[in-house]
Image (tube, rainbow, N blue to C red):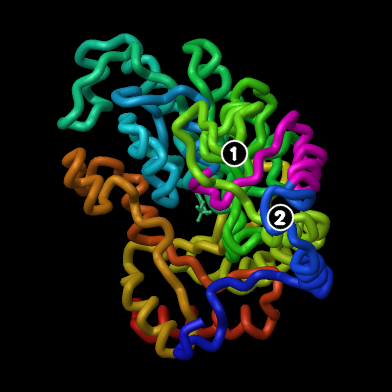
Amino acid sequence: MSPKFTIPMSSPDLTEAERQAVSAVLQTPYLSMGRELEAFEAAFCNFTGSRSAIGVNSGTAGLHLCVRAAGITEGDIVITTPFSFVSSTNVLLFERAVPIFVDVEATTGNINVGLVNQAVKDITSGGTAAENWLPSSVTSDGARLKAILVVDVFGQPSDMDPILKIAEEHNLKVIEDSCEALGAEYKGRKAGTLGDYGVFGFYPNKQITTGEGGVIVTSDDRAASIMLALRNQGRAPGDTWLEHSYLGYNYRLDEMSAALGRVQLTRLDEMLAKRSRVAAWYENRLFEIPEVETPKIEKSTSRMSWFVYVIRLTHAVDRDYVVRELEKRGVPARPYFAPIHLQRYMVEQFGYKEGDYPVTEDLGHRSLALPFSGVMKETQVDFVCSATREIIHQAGM
Ligand SMILES: *Cc1c(COP(=O)(O)O)cnc(C)c1O
């Protein structure tokens, strides 16, 4: 935490059990590819009901392996969202695939399924209808539409049923970026298990952490065996240490991280309950401020997994002024997300401009992530909310 802040933006929730588990690994010579990883993966299979769980050293690595296992290659089209953390799009660019952005729902920030349906129809029919969805720098034909990559934004599942339906009709793979949604449920089904492959991320601000890390879950055995090989420098089952059947990566999760994650996963219910309680403290203090919109939970979200607490300020409020004033009071706050299509490298490669995805841009302009974690104290939430209210009112907005 920068010394200018008195409340951290996020904090991991760690106990003696985690410290002991990591320390126990350090008493052994097995620091990678050992029992802890196997146990962590087994616990994930048990938790999700998926046939395979594959530990990796970041959520991004997990998403990249999904893209490789789906057979997505140069020039293939993947429908995805511009309102996300950049890695959900970057993993497509790593393989020189073409991300086609579809704007999001204003309520949740998740991909707009009506627009997904329209995009799939237009792109597969080819011709001029397809052109509308492609960035000006790209020409492609609908036959190359391969997958839909959805993101469960801020811990709330996307509206998966209609997405799965259209994917099935058009033989598309569905990759679920659930890096922000461990433990969330959609109509009683677990986020991350709804598409062909799902990915969870364990960076220290996530619901559970391994330091750096992630896990892929899938019930597709063929994909799982490819992912296992690619994670481990392309070694297929039966390859020796210096035999590599495929072009692979080192995306392995080490034993200390796996041990930490295994204990964290056993505490998931407790930690999600604490996060819900903090979110409720925020809601109770902020809902009556007219310039503040608090997060909305869809009916289809049968279980919310609070990842961040992101409010939206009305158009009359200068968000960046609020950020600066909060900072003066020792409170960190940040815009979340910044639209992916407006990142410099995306503009350079695809020629996107302001106005291309208006809902995403509007959320990007008005969103404000406030400090949030399961270990936050009610007095800290009080302080953040009082400061926010005061700043908005003093500015006469
Ligand atoms: C955290 C996160 C990831 C993965 O991030 P890593 O830092 O690579 O673990 C991917 N997508 C989203 C939406 C995320 O929030």
Rendered residue at 61%/59% (across/down): 206
Could you give the CA–CA distance between mark 2 and mark 1, rounded to whole angstroms? 22 Å
Q: Nearer the viewer, mark 2 or mark 1?
A: 1
Rendered residue at 26%/50% (across/down): 342
Magenta span covers which residues? 38-61
Q: Secondary structure at mark 1?
A: loop
Q: Is residue 40 magenta?
A: yes
Going by the image, does 29 lie left or right of 85?
A: right
Rendered residue at 77%/55% (across/down): 262
Q: Is the residue marked by circle 1 packed among few (<14), some (14-19), or many (20+) residues within 10 Å?
A: few
Q: Nearer the viewer, residue 190 or 23?
A: 23
Tag of residue 166: none
Tag of residue 241: 1
Compared with 360, 229 (above or below) is above
Q: Nearer the viewer, residue 357 or 374?
A: 374
Q: Nearer the viewer, residue 154 or 12?
A: 12
Q: Amino acid under label 1? A: Trp
> Residue 25, located in which quarter of the rendered image?
bottom right
Going by the image, does 294 lie left or right of 141?
A: right
Q: Is residue 364 visible?
A: yes
Going by the image, does 149 lie left or right of 288?
A: left
Q: Which residue is mark 2?
A: 258
